[in-house]
Amino acid sequence: MTSWYFIQTASGTDGVSYGLNVQGAGSAPGTPIITWGWQGGADNELWAIGDDGSVVSALGSGLYLAPSPEGSGLVISATPAYWSFTAQGTIAAEDGSVITAASAEPLQGALVQLSPAEDGPPATQSWWTAPNMQAIQQQFSAWRYIVSNLTDGDGTTFVLNVKGADESPGTDVIVWQLEADSSNSMWQITSDGRILSAMNRSLLLGAAESDGGPVVIQSALSPESGQTWNFGPSGVIGNPDTGLSLGIDGQPDSLQPGTGPLAVIGAAGGSDPPASFQWQLAPDNPLNTIVMQSPQPFPAFLDEEASVYAYIMNALGIADIRSEYANLTISLSDLHTTISTMPCPPELDQTAWNAVVAELGDEITRADSVRQFFDEFRAYQTSLQTSCTDRGLAIGTLAGLEEGSSMSIGGLILSVFEGILYTVLEAVPGGEEAVSTASIIGNVMEGCINVATNAANVSTTISADPFQVAYAKLWDDIGTAFQSTTDAAGLMETIILSDWGKMQAFYAASMATGPNTLSWPSGQTATLVDNSLPGFEISALQMLLPAKFQIYFYYQNDDSPVNGVPSEAQWVTPGGGGTWVKYWIAGQDSWEAYPDSDLMQQHVWGNGVARSDFFQSCNGWGFATSYWEGTHNVVLTICNQTPNVLTVGYEVIDGSGAFLRPSLLPGVSTAPLPPYGSDTLLATSRMYLDAPIWVKDQSGNLIAELVVNRDPNGFQAGDVWISNQATSGGYSLSSPICNSGDIIDKCSGAAQITIFWSGS
């Protein structure tokens, strides 16, 4: 694990954190080093300190902090130099000279010098190495509640809720008490400001009228004004299209269970909005904000206090207690007891002694709150990982996969964590304490996952790209991802414990109440693990089942069940025009080989999976789909596992080739790909198939291309494969699933591929 540091000077009187900075972010050797104000973790202000004393820039592994060969300044160099860091804060070169900041303001842009060391070094020769990381990239979109700041006398939590869980566009959004198993109260906020419903992710929050009035759910496939939102620091959620803000009808001063007032847009009233216009996201990951805030050194001990501090450190046998806050092998409570019971020697000032002891006690109290929080997270992670591994092996066996099998499994690690956090939140009963406890998992896990997708911060990263792995290695890969989040948590813990400002901010959050507190009740950890497991099961099955099974479907004029297929393995739904679509799940090589009954009843439907999602490859499910009684067909299922509305286009080929959606005339046709939804394309041909497919974003940019191929082969409907895959614009494609059909069993060929957002 690489630890990055902001090397900050103790000088400066304007309250700005100034540190060693590569001028202009230049990477050419010889670029001078200046002091510059904190930029939030830019590459040219972050440094890694090697065990040998070398200091390397985050601009590149071969760029080192070094004395200037021409004079007394500092530069970056391709040749390492070696430095000594002392407890007094000096950073000394091999010749004994020390790094020295300018002695007069302004420090912004001032050249850094090497000067002879002074006794009792002045502030210009004292430096503080604040551990930090490069800016946390948002790679993971969690589910959230949108919580009103209003409550009742019992502390009930009230959240934005789709009235009656009605998925019809135009349904009112209300403010309702938080209840367990309420997907109509959970939302995902996209990077462009849309708010998608967990109830149906092709639905989003929109303003019904541009001049005020009710907030409703609308179809993401019908872009309208008023469907994007922004989140202000005062808790106001603004609608930039209308210039109004999210509020509660009638602007009440409190809420009562069971009343369900309408959510509306209206004028929030400037800088002091009423409480009915103030909201919190839960979870909202306050750890990101704390970790990335400007570095702040611990209070300096001067004069008599400096003598007291030196005496106490000598008595404890350590150089600097503040450097031990992040040393988890040392008991801070024991140190606190020793310090608080240590008598003041007669040669030291009692008032100064009392001030130093009080300050250290205050710091240790705050450091302990950080440690206790991350101890609980580690306990949660350890227990959850063990339980997930055991549960994964069990459902793998039920799915008919043998331990050690080389069968290829595809998936997305981020989806595993999304599923875990979803079911933790969904299991929350009403009440402020309950939502706070569940949100705590999101508050830390989301930050850890985002950190663990940055290769500069943890030794083993979580990739946002889809993976393809043998089943024998799947659980090891998932275990490695869990370890990555644990490593990331350790990095965040170290950063907070090494910075006085961050430690104070964390302690304040741990003492706060509400949905984004950082207080973790230890008695809740086991319950949180139990609530996490259904989400893991669903995510694991979304990877396992498509590797062995596929979906079969056909049309009929009645709604009777499919003969001979177990009830838990089928679904019949209206297909329009007086027809019914009949789906079932079975083996890729046999439409009569059904999944284990207990697997389907307990771990699929028992975990609340919607049959429409399962059989139509939505919301994380992605099966190859075969058209029964369609012997010469090929069915392509293309899944959109992103929050964005996409468009799939395909060529309708005439003559000896094929027709995709054969009712269409030759030419090019398009169909919408809703967020987390899918589209099924049907190609018919007794000959070879070579069908190009493309996908575009809402701006018309081409983001994916592929070709569906079919080669007739004896009694099979034909070998099926996908070729010429290409992506751009931050999107990626999964490894396709391709299954041959069978003429005897009257099953078409099938192919499935998923579009993911990886940002790379």
Image (cartoon, helix red, strand yellow):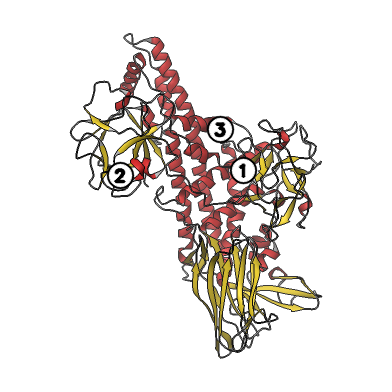
SS class, disc 3: helix
Query: Which residue was labeled with disc 1?
Result: 438
Q: State left or right for residue 210 relative to residue 107.
A: right
Query: Which residue was labeled with disc 3?
Result: 510
Q: Mark 3 belongs to which amino acid?
A: Ser
Indicate which label's residue lies in the foreground, 1 or 2.
2
Question: Which label number is shown at residue 56?
Answer: 2
SS class, disc 1: helix
Earlier residue among tags 1 and 2: 2
Q: Is residue 601 above or below residue 338?
A: below
- Seen at 38% across and 13% down, the residue is 343
Whether pointer 2 and pointer 3 mark residues with C-beta atoms closer than 8 Å, the reply is no
Q: Is residue 47 above or below residue 633?
A: above
Earlier residue among tags 2 and 3: 2
Q: Is residue 96 visible?
A: yes
Q: Is residue 222 above or below residue 521?
A: below
Measure how far apart labels 3 and 1 are at the Cα level: 14 Å
